[in-house]
Image: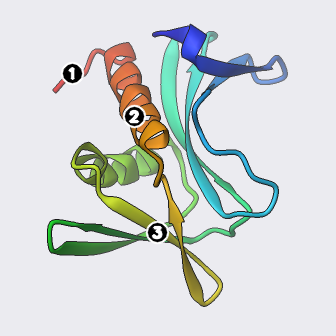
């Protein structure tokens, strides 16, 4: 993993390290959704977590690209459930789709800047390399 590109947070209480890409958007008020790589050194495992900021679960995500549109409802769940959500979103991320998240009654853009899109792709690439699953 290219650790230099990530902000790291140690969770000694859980024996885990969290990696958030350094080019993600940070806001105190705007709804955000970050992908976080979680390394569990005790179990020698890696997980992906969807970290919602300034928006409540369940999440409603809408995507658009090349005349196609889809909506996803994401519940906060365990590792395998969150990974399944990421697998649903990954093809859209790879196609540089436009993403929106529902905040109350309105839709707000997320992952819209080129550096954020690149950060998402890099994070996914690093995660799947960590678990020896490359496509």
In the rendered structure, the answer to whether residue 4 lies left or right of residue 119 reads right
Name the side, left or right, on which 44 lies relative to 129.
right
Give the image location of residue 22, x and y in percent.
Answer: 62, 27
- Label drawn at residue 100: 3
Q: Earlier in the sequence, mark 3 or mark 1?
A: 3
Q: CA distance from mark 3 to mark 2?
A: 17 Å
Position of 13 relative to 62 (above/below):
above
Q: State the mark number for residue 118.
A: 2
* Res. 17 in view: no
The residue carrying pointer 1 sits among few (fewer than 14), some (14 to 19) or many (20 or more) residues within 10 Å by Cα, namely few
Is 63 placed left or right of 56 in the picture?
Answer: left
Q: Are marks 3 and 1 in contact (CB under 8 Å)?
A: no
Q: Please tell me in which quadrant of the rendered image residue 72 appears.
A: bottom left
Residue 85: x and y, percent? Answer: 38, 54
Q: Secondary structure at mark 1?
A: loop
Packing grade of label 2 (10 A; few <14, some 14-19, many >=20) is: some
Single out the mark in the foreground, 3 or 1.
3
User: Do callouts 3 and 2 mark residues in contact (Cβ within 8 Å)?
Assistant: no
**Cα gap from disc 1 to disc 2, whole angstroms:** 17 Å
What's the image's color scheme?
rainbow
Labels 1 and 2 touching (C-beta < 8 A) = no
Q: Which residue is mark 1?
A: 134
Residue sitting at x 41%, y 63%:
99
Is 48 in front, or is 44? Answer: 48
Q: Earlier in the sequence, mark 3 or mark 2?
A: 3
């Amino acid at each position: 993993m290219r650790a230099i590109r990530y902000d790291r947070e140690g969770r000694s209480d859980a024996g885990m390290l969290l990696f958030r890409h350094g080019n993600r958007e940070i806001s105190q008020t705007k709804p955000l959704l970050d992908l976080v790589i979680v390394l569990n050194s005790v179990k020698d495992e890696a997980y992906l977590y969807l970290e919602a900021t300034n928006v409540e679960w369940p999440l409603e995500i809408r995507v658009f690209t090349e005349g196609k549109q889809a909506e996803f409802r994401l519940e906060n769940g365990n590792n395998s459930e969150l990974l399944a959500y990421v697998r649903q979103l990954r093809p859209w991320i790879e196609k540089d789709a436009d993403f929106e998240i529902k905040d109350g009654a309105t839709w707000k853009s997320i992952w819209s800047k080129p550096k954020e899109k690149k950060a998402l792709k890099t994070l996914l690439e690093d995660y799947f390399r960590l678990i020896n699953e490359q496509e």
